[in-house]
Amino acid sequence: MTATTAAAIDCGTNSIRLLVAEADPATGRLTDLERRMEIVRLGQGVDRTGRLAPEALARTLAACRDYAAVLRSYGVPPERLRFVATSASRDAENRDEFVRGVADILGVTPEVITGDEEAALSFAGATAGLAPLALAPPYLVVDIGGGSTEFVLGDDRVEAARSVDIGCVRLTERHLTGGDGRIADPPSAAQVASIAADVGAALDVAADTVPLGRAHTLVGLAGSVTTVAAIALGLPAYDSAVIHHTRVPVEEVRRVTGELLAATHAERAAIPVMHPGRVDVIGAGALVLLTIMERTGAREVVVSEHDILDGIARSVLDRA
C-alpha cells in the first residue's frame, strides 16, 4: 500500500459509504479505487426517541463488516482509514454503543463530528474539481443528508458554514409518518406545506450565519440531489459519471419534486434510477432542494458526486 492511498467512511443518518482512493503525487488528484454505498437508515426513529434503534445499529455494523473485508482486500491499515459519523450519531443518547461496535470491527474509533466540521469536509470534497467548469464564485455548497443539511459558502476556502436539522429522513419521520409507522402515500397538501414551513424556518437559522444571497453558484450534494438530477435527465439507470457536474435548472427541480410528491410508493419505486432505500424519503429531500433554490434565487444547481467522502479522504492524505 503506497503512502498516497487512503480510505474514508462516511456514516450518516440514511447511508454509510466507503471510498478507497489514491492521490497523484504530482497533482494531488484523487482516483477512486473503490466507492460503495449501503442504505442502513441508522437514524431510524432518532428524531422521536433520541436513541439508535437496535435493528438500525445491527444493519450499520453489518455494513461495517462488509467494508472491513474490502479494506483488507486493498491492504489498507487502520491508520490510513478515517471514519466520520454525522447527524444521527450526534443526536443519539446511546452513541457509545455504536462507537464501540465500529472500533471492534474496523480498528478505528469513529469521529462523531460537529455540523461545522461536516460542512468543511463537504466543501473540500465538492469544490476540488470545480475549477475547469469556470463557475462564478462564491459557491454555496448544500449537502442534503438524512438528518441534517449543511450550508457552506466560500471560494477557495470556507467563509461561513451552518448545519441545520432538515434532512430527508428526519423530515419524513416528522411530517409524513403516522402513529402506526406508515408513511403517507402520497402525502397530503397540508403535509407538504408543513415540510416546506420546517425547511423555511431552518433556512432562516442558516441565513443568520451564512449569507445565502451572496452565492453565485449553487452546488448540491448527496443522494437526494443526485437522484433528482438523474430523474431530470431521464436516465434509464443511475450513472454517476453522467450525473457528476450536470446542471439542473430550477424549473426541472420543481417539476421532478412535484411528480415525486404526487406519486405513490409503488410509482416512486418503479423509477429506474431510484435506490430502494430512498423511495420513502426522496419526496422530502427533493422539497428541501427546491425550497433552497427558491429561497436563494438559484436558477440552477450544479450537481456533484464528490462530497464529504472525498473531503474525508483528502484529510487522511493531508495528515500523512
Image: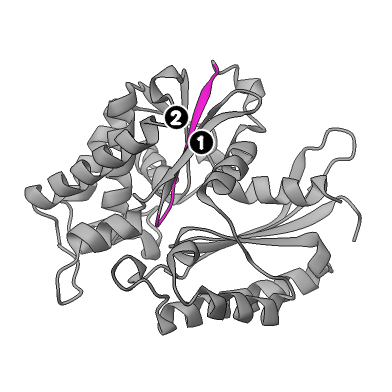
Residue 19 point in image, percent of width and height = 67, 57
User: Which element type, helix, strand or loop, lies under badge 1?
Assistant: strand
Residue 41, labelled with which disc? none
Q: Is residue 270 visible?
A: no
Q: Is residue 55 left or right of residue 66?
A: left
Question: Could you tell me which residue is drawn at 79 percent across and 69 percent down?
Answer: 78
Q: Amino acid at mark 2?
A: Val
**Residue 92 position within the rendered picture, expressed as x and y whole percent measured from the top left:** 44, 70
Residue 169 rendering spot, x and y as whole percentages? 34, 59
Mark 2 — residue?
Answer: 210
Residue of label 1: 161
In the image, is 93 to the left or to the right of 170?
right
Quarter of the view holding residue 99: bottom right
Name the colour scheme: one colour
Q: CA distance from mark 1 to mark 2?
A: 6 Å
> SS at mark 2?
loop
Find the magenta span and give its range: 137-147
Characterize the local packing of mark 2: few (<14), some (14-19) or many (20 or more) Cα atoms within 10 angstroms: many
Asked if the residue under mark 2 is in contact with the one under mark 1, i.e. CB atoms within 8 Å, the reply is yes
What kind of residue is marked 1? Answer: Ala
Query: Image quadrant of residue 105?
Result: bottom right
Check the image and report above or below for 120 versus 103.
above
Q: Is residue 23 magenta?
A: no
Mark 1, other Cα within 10 Å: few <14 / some 14–19 / many ≥20:
many
- Decide: is 53 above or below 47: below
The one of 32 and 299 positioned closer to us in this rendering = 299
Q: Is 139 contained in the magenta span?
A: yes
Residue 84 visible in this rendered orientation of the protein: yes
Q: Looking at the image, is mark 1 or mark 2 earlier in the sequence?
A: 1
* Residue at the (74%, 47%) spot, across then down: 315
